[in-house]
Image (spheres, rainbow, N blue to C red):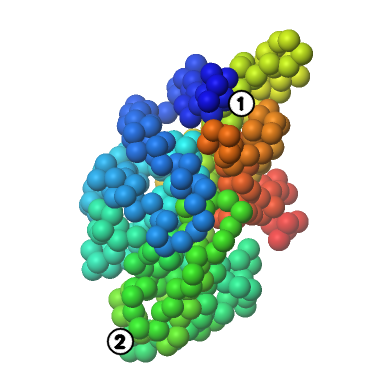
Amino acid sequence: MSAEQKIFSQDRPERLQNSLYCDMFLPDETTAIRREVRAFCEQHVAPVAWKIGHTEESVAAFPRELFKNMAAAGLFRIPFPEDVGGRGLKYPATATATVIEELSYYSNSVAAIYDVHCILAGHALEYGSDATREKFLAPLLSGKVIGSFATSEPNASTDLSVSALETEAIFHSDHIVINGRKRWITNSPVADFVVLLCKDDGRMTEVVVDLHAKGVTVGAPDKKLGNHGQLTADITFENVVVPIGNVLGKRGEGLKIALQVLTYGRIGISASGVGMAQAILDHGSHRLKTRRAFGQAMAQFQHWQFKMAERATEIENARNLYIKAARRMDEGQAFPEPEAAMAKWYATNLAGEFAREGVQIFGGYGFTKELAADGSHYRVEEIYRDCKIAEIYEGANEIQKWVIARNIFGKDYTG
């Protein structure tokens, strides 16, 4: 490999965030979490990130060793209070979103695994009884089990109305019987339980279901454009008997719980957009300084100077948006709108637009998964594939714009 090729395939360029962004709005505990998680990522995530992002989806390919390392480092305890075994941070949502930004800088797949395990499944379990939390949440925090969260179905995803939902829970005196099918369920091929949104006598209820129970069938992992390390699969329920104590919250409050945890999740996804955009800025700026065209470095062309200046400013804005939404959640706002919707749309849209430019910066190298001549590879190619899902899951960006519009015009106009 030539010296030039070694520069182009460099895995760890200068982190421009250190010089461009001031964490003046973050609490000291959150900046400490950022330092802790960044050090963890550099040691544990960076060395395996490319393999995770480029290995076809399979149960065997799930990054179990990394998952165990995350548990051992206490990363799964960051979002939770002390009374359930968490770290008891004053600003847990802010810290959690920061964790996701740092993870997604190296691997959006790993960030998605963390998001669903901790924010969606884990946070939903906080609505359960003491016995339910002891059975499911305690081992989730220690990494002994893997959690999943299911709202989407083959015919119901963006539309979570009771009329669209087909998975049904029939209540008996001491148990529940569940029938139905869920789709796009992150972690399901390797998960031990799922938090499930069900139709329940004309309303919706959240129930936690052991995925090892009789009548549960988890399909093979879907083959996706990107986020290969984030395994998704259908789950089918055929007369699955569930203890009645597995209800989360009260019967009929399932949609409220689901929407609350998905709002939290949107803040996390916005942070992942920031992490990916930051990675493009770092790798792209390094490439522009080292790639030469017409006798000069590409960084000397005003087009790229202005483009990178614009993107750096947008990353600043996106990061501030997700931090503001997370801080509002930490201060008791279960639905911190419109900031959560703004952050999710703005940050993931930024990642998508910037990823296209990142590939352009690297040219043919950016379009290559791995260069046959020397085995080198380039981060922007993976981000280009991974970033698209961030505009879709946990509330499509069109829905986020609708939420923002509703805050402008009111429900009488937007519905």
Question: Label 1 is placed on what type of residue?
Answer: Gly
Residue 283 placed where, x, y %?
56, 27
Q: Nearer the viewer, residue 199 or 228?
A: 228
| Nearer the camera: disc 2 or disc 1 | 1
Q: Is residue 375 above or below residue 268?
A: above
Residue 297: percent from left, percent from top: 68, 13
Residue 249 horizontal side relative to residue 87, left or right: right
According to the picture, the residue beneath numbered tag 1 turns out to be 284
* Three-letter amino acid code at the position of disc 2: Asp
- Give residue 70's position: percent from left, percent from top: 31, 45
Q: Position of residue 98 (x, y in %)?
A: 43, 37
- N-terminal-most mark, 2 or 1: 2
Query: Which residue does the numbered mark 2 point to in the structure image?
Result: 174
Quadrant holding the C terminus: bottom right
Q: Is residue 229 above or below residue 101?
A: below
Asked if one can make out residue 348 in the rendered structure from this viewpoint, the answer is: no
